[in-house]
Image (tube, rainbow, N blue to C red):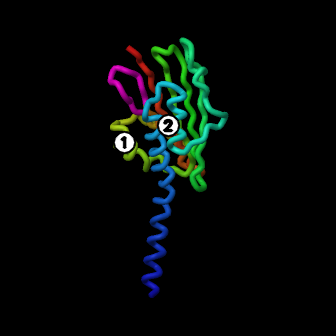
Amino acid sequence: MLRILLCLLLLCLGAAPAAADDNGLALLAFFEKTCAQRPALPTALQRLAKAAGFASEYGDIAPDAESGEKLDLIYWAKLELGAATFKLSAYFSGDRNATSVSCTIATVGVNGHDLVPAIEVAEKVASPSTELSQDGLFGRLKWKFGAADGNDRLELSFRRDEPRRTSLNLSYQIRKP
C-alpha cells in the first residue's frame, strides 16, 4: 500500500510542471485564433478576439476609426481563464496600402523553452535567433515569418523566474497590390 501511495505522489509531482505548461499551450492557441490570422484592420482583429473569448478593454473600435489614408490605432483586449489572464494588444500604423501591424498576446505561468517546439510546428518556423540576458532570466527567440522577401517576424519573449511572464508577438506588414 505504501508503494502505491509513493507512486501516486511521484506521479502528481511529475504532473506539476505539465500543469504549468497549460498556460503556454493556451497562449499559443489564442495567438493562433487572433494574431496568427494576420488581420489587416483593427476591427477584423476585434472580431477574431471576441470569437476567442476576449473582451475589448477600452470599448469597441468604431469602423470609422479605420477610415482615411493612414492608420494609427491600438487595440487592447483581455481574457480571464481560470486564474490566468491573457492580454492582447495590437498596433496598426502607416499607409492603408502598406499597414504595419504588431500583435502581441501575453500571460504568466509559461515555460518559454518548453513552448518553442509547439510554436515551430504551429507556425511552420525553425532555427530562431536567440538572445538571453546576462543573468539568464530573460530570453527572446526570433523567427523570420511569412513572405520570404519580407521582414515579418515572430518573437517569443519570456522570463524564466516567477511569475514566468511570456509574450508571443507577430510583426507583419499588410501589402496591397
* Region in magenta: 142-153
Q: Give the Cα separation between the discs numbered 2 and 1.
A: 18 Å
Q: Is residue 69 above or below residue 85?
A: above
Visible in this render: residue 136? no
Image-quadrant location for residue 173? top left
Toward the viewer: 37 or 61? 61
**Between 53 and 35, the one nearer to me in the picture:** 53
- Ranked by sequence position, the earlier of labels 2 and 1 is 2
User: Answer yes or no: do the residues labelled 2 and 1 have beta carbons within 8 Å?
Assistant: no
Circle 1 residue: 122
Specify the amino acid type for callout 1.
Ala
Q: Label 2: how many residues lie within 10 Å, few (<14), some (14-19) or many (20+)?
A: some
Q: Determine which quarter of the picture holds residue 149.
A: top left
What's the residue at 54%, 12% (across, down)? 69
Q: Quadrant of the C terminus?
A: top left
Name the mark nearer the viewer: 2 or 1: 2
Residue lying at the far front of the rendered structure: 63
What secondary structure is found at the residue carrying circle 2?
A: helix
Three-letter amino acid code at the position of disc 2: Leu
Instruction: Find residue 163 and report its horizontal and vertical position in percent.
Output: 60, 50
Going 56% across and 26% down the picture, which residue do you hit?
91
